[in-house]
Every structure is written in structure tokens, then in C-alpha cells.
Image (cartoon, rainbow, N blue to C red):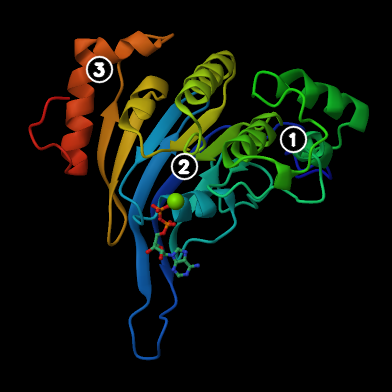
Amino acid sequence: MIGADNRIDGVTPSRLEVREMARSFPAERRGEAPGEVLRDISLSVRAGEFVAIVGPSGCGKSTLLNVIAGLQEPTSGYVALDGERNARRLGLVAYMHQRDLLLPWRTVLENARLGLELQGMPLNEANRRAGDLTARFGLGGVEQAYPWRLSGGMRQRVALLRATLPDQGVLLLDEPFGALDAITRADLQQWLADVLDREDKAVVLVTHDVEEALLLADRVLVMSSSPGRIIENITVDLPRPRSSEVVTDSRFVELKRRLLAALGLHRGAAL
Ligand code: ADP
Ligand code: MG
């Protein structure tokens, strides 16, 4: 049962399955075929598993996350959460959009605590939980600022904090580190890995960055475009915790080569 606090019996789903899912958009002009964006997408992510999705720009990664999150419905096939098909998904999974979508009339802290508020947490506790993490997210001292005052990278960090704070079992992240400088990026990647190691979330991370996928994920799915399909499923059998030094590990280098080859970017150059 879905309660008023948006949880099913107090616990949000933590297992995700997508089966033979397709998604088309209506034709732009009369007489044209509808635009097929995703074709025959099947994937499953169990509780505690971290899956990364890489693929070229425009192949449908954000559309896939929108469908999983319940913002759009599949044209065919289905999404199941904890085995329940096409259940009402909106609000049950945590989702950090590619665009940060911060509320302009709310401060950094008020934006960050939004998901906790929606779960019914008292404001003073939500403030404390969000406030405890602002420094780690490089947001110390700007808690009371409004989004228009922030850089793109800072806005993205607020959006990441907002998505990860509520304790939802499925977490969808759409290029969460895209606009960050290298140091913040490495720090937040490590933070995410640490946090998720201790939790049993099912995580789907969309990224352009093959090294990021290998650093964080248990499995990497590679997509191709027109229409978007999953063409590779690569298990990342590297021990955890993975430090930034793992990039020199020969298994890492081999996995990276396989991923780049699947993406069609491998031109025999030194990696
Ligand atoms: P990615 O995130 O991999 O860059 P998107 O999922 O954003 O790709 O987009 C995939 C394709 O779907 C693009 O060709 C885009 O133009 C198309 N698309 C996305 N949303 C819509 C929509 N609402 N209506 C029509 N086409 C769309
Ligand atoms: Mg996208």
C-alpha cells in the first residue's frame, strides 16, 4: 500500500526491472513516422547493485531514466519496482535530473531538504540532516543563498545532495558530476561510493565518463543510438573500495578498452 508519505508500507522499493521496453515520441509532422527513441530495453538492478549506463549523446539515456522514474510511460514493455509492474513510480525512486531543476524561490538548504520534507520529516530534523552534509558537498557557507547566486557546479551539488538525502531504495543519477571541477568530482565520487557501500540501494548512474563508470559501478551497460538499445553488459570485477589508483590496474585498463571499443571510440590509441 502506498501511504501518504509516498512509501510502500514505510519502505520504498529497492529492486528495479525494465523488460522489453520501447518508447516513441509522436511524429513532429503529419505523415511522418513516430520518433522511436528506445527499443527493446531490458535491464534489472537488484538491491545494493550499482549499474552505470554509458552511451553517445542523444541515444536516449535521459529518456530511459524518465521512464524508470515514472515521468513518462513506456510505449511498450514495462518497468517493475520490487516485482510490481508499472506501479505508480513517481516519487518512489530518487532521481537527479541532468538539468538541476532547483526551485529559485528556495535557498540552498531549503532545496536540499525538499525530498525529506516530502517524506514528512519535521523541518528542524530535515534542516539538520541536510546541514550536516553541506560542507562535504562544498556548500558550506552558502546554505542561505538562492540558486541564482550559485555557479553551475554548485547548483549541481545541491541537486545531488537533494537526490541522495531521502532514503529511497532506487537512486537514478543523470550525469551528476558533469559540470564539476576535477577535485570536487573526485571527492563526490568517493563520497557516493562510500555512502552506497553502506546502503542497499539500487543505483543507476548515467555518465559520459568511462572511467567514472568503472570506478563506481558493479556493471556497465553500453547503449547505441537511433534507436537507443543496450549493446553491451560488462561486469566490473574490481575489488572495493576502489581508490583513484585503480585506473592503473591492468584489469581496469582492459575493461576500459572493452568499453571504448563497444562505444566505437577505440582507435588503437594509447589509453
Ligand atoms: P541522451 O540523454 O542520451 O542524450 P535523450 O534521452 O535526452 O538522450 O534524447 C534521446 C532522443 O529523444 C533525442 O533524439 C531527443 O531529441 C528525443 N526526445 C527526447 N525527449 C523528447 C520529447 N519529449 N519529444 C520528442 N523527442 C524527444
Ligand atoms: Mg541526457
The mark nearer the N terminus, 3 or 1, is 1
Q: Name the one closer to the observer, 58 or 75.
A: 58
Q: Name the one closer to the observer, 85 or 219.
A: 219
Q: CA distance from mark 1 to mark 2?
A: 28 Å
Q: Name the one closer to the observer, 66 or 43.
A: 66
Q: Quadrant of the N terminus?
A: top right
Q: Which one is closest to the eye, mark 3 or mark 2?
A: 3
- Quarter of the image where one finds residue 237: top left
Q: Amino acid at mark 2?
A: Glu
The mark nearer the N terminus, 1 or 2, is 2
Q: Which residue is mark 2?
A: 17
Q: Which residue is mark 1?
A: 112
Residue found at x 54% / y 22%: 188
Q: Name the one closer to the observer, 122 or 113.
A: 113
Q: Which residue is mark 3?
A: 252
Q: CA distance from mark 3 to mark 1?
A: 35 Å
Q: Are marks 1 and 2 in contact (CB under 8 Å)?
A: no
Where does the image place residue 138, in percent across and percent down from the top left? 65, 24
